Image: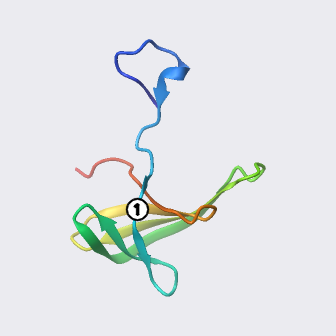
Amino acid sequence: MVALSRAAGGADRLRPLRRPRPLGVEVSAQGMPAAVRTAAGWVEVVAVLDHWRLDDEWWRERPEQRWYYRLALAGGRTLTVFHDRASGAWLAQEYGRAG
């Protein structure tokens, strides 16, 4: 979290960084991401580098249940995406810019 610029300080003036963004994903017959939609159009997933499950806040009425995938895309870019099992939505999780 970072403070909003040109604003008085305080916890109510914080905003999240790199909020996940909705993403179009085509899945294979096995349920793995096969292509993602970028600003340039659909890009093939050449490899799933890693995948893991997150079950969090299990005590709440609507716990978080997500499957994360670290993807290698055609053209050399990598991307982390997750499938929100509660809503069915696919989202891209940006961690920073590649250097």
- Residue 53, x across and y down, in percent: 59, 64
Image height check: is 19 above or below 87? above
SS class, disc 1: loop
Q: How crowded is mark 1: few (under 14 residues within 10 Å), some or many (20 or more)?
A: some
Q: Where is residue 30 in the image (x, y as percent from the top left)?
A: 52, 85
Residue at the spot x=47%, y=67% of the render? 69
In this rendering, is residue 13 above or below 66? above
Q: Which residue is drawn at 22% across and 65% down?
A: 40
Query: Extreme bottom residue here?
Result: 29
Within the image, what quadrant is residue 54 found in? bottom right
Q: In this view, does 2 lie to the left or right of 99?
A: right
Q: Is 74 left or right of 66, judged from the image as shown?
A: left
Task: Judge by depth and name the residue closer to the eye, 85 or 52.
Answer: 85
Q: Residue at x 54, y 21 (%)?
A: 11
The residue singled out by tag 1 in the image is 23
Kind of residue indicated by mark 1: Leu
Position of 40 with respect to 92 (left or right) is left
